[in-house]
Amino acid sequence: MKKLLTLAITLIFAASVAAGEFPDISIKDLRAAIETKKVTVVDVNGTTSWRKARIPTAIDFATHKNDLAKVLPKDKSAMIVAYCSSPT
C-alpha cells in the first residue's frame, strides 16, 4: 500500500507540472491533508484504474460525475485535489 501511495502521489506531482493554472500541492502537504482529513481527492483516471489502484480516500469521478456535488464538501473554500495519470 505504501508503494501504491508513493506511485500515485508521484503521478500527481508529474501532472501538476502541466497544470500551471492551478495551485500546486507538495506530496508532503497532500499526505498531511489526507491524514488530517482536510482534503477531498478526486481520481479522474476512470473506474477501471480507480479499482486497481488509487490514492486512499479518492473519489472515482466516473462513478460520481452526475452527482459530484453530493460527494464534494459543501464548504466552497475546502481543498479539493483532482489527479489523473496524464500530464495533459
Image (tube, grey):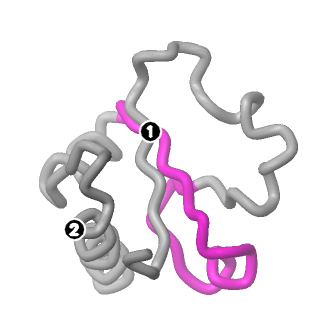
* Image coordinates for residue 86, horizontal then vertical, percent: 45, 81
Check the image and report above or below for 61 versus 86: above
Q: Earlier in the sequence, mark 1 or mark 2?
A: 2
Q: Position of residue 8 (x, y in %)?
A: 37, 76
Mark 1, residues whose alpha carbon is within 10 Å: few (<14), some, or many (≥20)? few
Magenta span of residues: 37-58
Quarter holding residue 46: bottom right
Above or below residue 49? Residue 31 is above
> Measuring 74% from the left and 74% from the top, which residue is drawn there?
47
Q: Secondary structure at mark 2?
A: helix
Q: Whole-percent x and y of residue 41? A: 48, 49
Label of residue 53 in the image: none
The residue wearing badge 2 is 17
- At x 21% / y 68%, what residue is drawn? 17
Q: Is residue 66 left or right of residue 14?
A: right
Residue nearest the viewer, comparing 34 with 46? 46
Crowd class of label 2 (few under 14; some 14 to 19; many from 20; radius 10 Å): few
| Residue type, label 1 | Ile
Left or right, 48 with reference to 1: right
Q: Quadrant of residue 72?
A: top right
Q: Nearer the viewer, residue 3 or 43?
A: 43
State the separation of the CA atoms marked 1 and 2. 17 Å
Residue of label 1:
80
Is residue 84 shown to the viewer in this render?
yes
Q: Tag 1's secondary structure? A: strand
The amino acid type found where label 2 is placed reads: Val
Q: Residue at x 45, y 63 (%)?
A: 83
Spot the residue most to the front. 21
